[in-house]
Amino acid sequence: MADSRAPLFDQAELDAVRRPVAEATNLPGGLYVEPAVFALEQESIFAKSWICAGRVDDLSEAGAFMTTEIAGRSVLLVRGEDGAVRGFHNVCRHRGACLVQTDCGTARSFRCNYHGWTYGSDGGLLAAPLMDERPGFDKNDHGLAGVRTEVWGGFVFVNLDPGATELSDAMAGFPDLSRYDLENLRRGHEVSYDVQANWKVLCENYSECYHCALVHPQLNRVTDYRSGGNSFEGPGFNGGPMMLAEGFTTMSTTGERRHPVIEGVGDEETRVHYLHFYPSFLIALLPEYVLLHRVQPDGPGRSRVSCEWFYPESTLAQSDFDASEEIEFWDVTNRQDWGLCEMVQQGAASRLRPGPYHPLEYCVHAFDRWYVERVGKRLESLSR
Ligand code: FES
Ligand SMILES: [Fe+2]
């Protein structure tokens, strides 16, 4: 008798994802619903990849900190007295309690609420009450455990894997975005959403506009779904541009640009560039603002998506700065997309996929192939 708990996908379905896009089929539905697959992804992907944790300018002064969760682990990021941003496992080295339980703030030191061990912003153990009663105890041996952090374009990336390649290697071939001056942009607005869908569903949905004419009338008006061209992929990313439609100068409810173009981009730019740095960093570059979506898995059928708008400081400083047209535009678009993603998640439970890709789903296929490459071998033990 078949084991009813066995995930319902097989190796042939994974192999079919790898074929050229015209012959390939989608990832099997079981990969979106199985807790064992989710656990495997957390360890094999999220605990081993460069994950964006936030903006370095959110850590603007010594002692500024933020916490984030990656692959189920809490991570503490702190700017030290020396100006360096460091990452640590947010875990006390005494009995392993979670050390900092707030999202962000500024602190001179971090005291564990259990027995009072106290750490400096460089992770060093400053105080450990009464531990001098234990022979040979040396505070120098019990600092916070570091995690690797690197900054790219003003974004702080964290990698839990001590043996991971450097971020610059992981981003090999990523398009040059220096004209957008990402490190000097500042956040103008942010919002987050809880979506009842697997993180891969969200990433796949981001990567195609085959659905746009039907589902996004507002978006399709300013960038026609067939205006995308020259999609591309690299070892750790995919992407491609879309053209602003005749008569429109940005993506917003009016389609009319309200802010100056980012210096270096040029007034003549009529494209919107979409890039997906795997696994979960989704960035859209418009002539006058940059939009980031970050997807944080929260279980096989649940994700948290943070959405942030970035502008040059000079734009934010304008007395009449008003981002409401692009904020509303993307909120409408996001919610339309979350509805689609939740439909796919519901469908995945039936495990009747896979189906074929349309050529407009080039980037979905690129992501799915990367995924199979990354975890396919480990998935074998779970396949039927
Ligand atoms: S667990 Fe932190 S001081 Fe004991
Ligand atoms: Fe969409």
Image: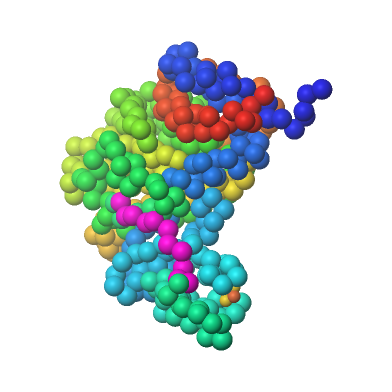
Instruction: Say which of 323 and 313 sits in front.
Output: 313
Q: Residue at x 45, y 40 (%)?
A: 279
Q: Quadrant of the N terminus?
A: top right
Is 83 left or right of 358, judged from the image as shown?
A: left
Tell me, yes or no, if residue 324 can be seen here.
no
Tell me, yes or no, if residue 166 can be seen here.
yes
Is 155 left or right of 14, judged from the image as shown?
A: left
- Report ligand 1 position as a quadrant: bottom right
Q: Quadrant of the C terminus?
A: top right
Q: Horizontal and vertical percent for residue 36? A: 64, 39
Q: Residue at x 24, y 59 (%)?
A: 314
In the picture as drawn, the residue positioned furthest to the right comes out as 1
Q: Horizontal and vertical percent for residue 62? A: 34, 74
Q: Residue at x 27, y 55 (%)?
A: 183
Q: Horizontal and vertical percent for residue 68? A: 49, 59
**Residue 317 covered by magenta stretch:** no
The number of numbered badges drawn on the structure is 0
Against 283, residue 144 (above or below) is below
Provide the residue span drawn in magenta: 142-152
Q: Main secondary structure of the magenta part?
A: strand
